[in-house]
Image: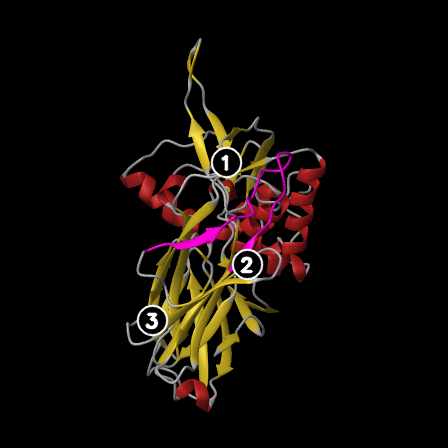
Amino acid sequence: MRTILNANWIMKDGNNAYLCAVPCSLYKVLLDNNAIPDPYYRENEYISTDLCRNDVTFSREFDASSEVLSADMQYLIFHGIDTLSEVYLNGEKIAETDNMHRIWELDVTGRLREHNTLEVRIRSPINYIEAENEKRPVWGVGECMKGYPHLRKAHCMFGWDWGPNLPDMGIWRDVELCAYNADRIKSVYCEVRNELPSDIAELFISAESTTENAEAIYTITDPNGAVIFNGKYPESGNIIIENPHLWWVRGLGGQPLYTVTVELRDKGGNVLDSCTKRIGLRTLVISKDKDEWGEEFCFKCNGVKVFAMGANYIPEDQIVTRMTKEKTVRLLEDCVEANFNFIRVWGGGIYPADWFYDKCDELGLIV
């Protein structure tokens, strides 16, 4: 059971309170309420940066159903908190966060009530990096605020040669209340183990669950919709796919995608949890063949060397809570129109969501 808790939040900034919805952040909420001028306009950056010297709080109330309250396991899952925070459930501190780039999965089993209050108190990133840098100075890019490498947060928020100093604070990805009985899937990993092209593909799948009490059933569907495997994982360690449809970087061929589904079932055959992935069957390696200068650095897709054409992907907006899937998809489609075959996810930004990589697979872009 999953309940999205994105609506009906309240942001408190000093004595002011604003209604908002996740994704929400200090700058986004203030801009939505016309409380500050556009920080991208002229020199408004310089009156916007110091807003993040003050702490900010996001809170909401929610009800938990009888089905959730009676479940074996209950979790609050924050898919993105930016960045330094304390999380409170019904007045009890249940977590401290210090990393924007990860999911925070909080076990609240036995702590939920029928009616609940949830509060995320976010501390100033500016005050933190300045204090840490006083104790241990670190090197950084000159355009950025000093001390920014001390924090696991999108570094471009602290300024860059292409952007202003806007070190935002907020809840930048979904919040969920999840309840499970007996067992659930934690992760699924897929990898082609043999070198392609070949007349077979040896597909390795690893599924991790919370216990070993349930049985995992694997289903693989080919790009034409035909089920080519269904059942328990083979003892051989790999699932053999005959005459595989190969995924190619754009310009060298098509991008057929297989669907892998893992279901956890109890002894009665009831599905407890499931996870679905879309994958391309391919071999991507780096060629370091010797040349007249020493050695090359060249990607090879299924044995074919690729001439790389692409650019950095940076956040479309430094106020990342204003980014949307629709805008990012349009950007990737524009990259294809510009004849890209590569996208490099720039290290000073964010880790894109899973759908970003799925879209790149569809478009034939190597990431």
Query: What is the x, y in percent for residue 335?
Result: 66, 38
- Between the residue at mark 2 and the residue at mark 3, the CA separation in whole angstroms equals 21 Å
Question: What is the secondary structure assignment of the residue under circle 1?
Answer: loop
The dot on residue 302 is 1
Q: Is residue 240 magenta?
A: yes
User: Dot 2 corresponds to which residue?
Assistant: 25
Q: Earlier in the sequence, mark 2 or mark 3?
A: 2
What's the residue type where badge 3 is placed? Answer: Ile
- Between the residue at mark 1 and the residue at mark 3, the CA separation in whole angstroms equals 48 Å
- Give the answer, above or below, for where 126 lies relative to 172: above
Q: Of discs 1 and 3, which sits in the foreground?
A: 1
Of 287 and 53, which appears nearest the observer? 287
Pointer 2: residues within 10 angstroms few (<14), some, or many (20+)? Answer: many
**Magenta stretch in the rendered image:** 237-259
Of 19 and 79, which appears nearest the observer? 79
* Magenta stretch secondary structure, dominant: loop
Is residue 231 among what the camera can see?
yes
Residue, x 55% and y 72% (percent of image)?
Answer: 9
Question: What is the secondary structure assignment of the residue under circle 3?
Answer: strand
Q: Earlier in the sequence, mark 1 or mark 3?
A: 3
Q: Are marks 1 and 2 in contact (CB under 8 Å)?
A: no
Query: What is the x, y in percent for residue 17?
Result: 57, 69
User: Dot 3 corresponds to which residue?
Assistant: 94
Query: What is the x, y in percent for residue 15?
Result: 53, 67
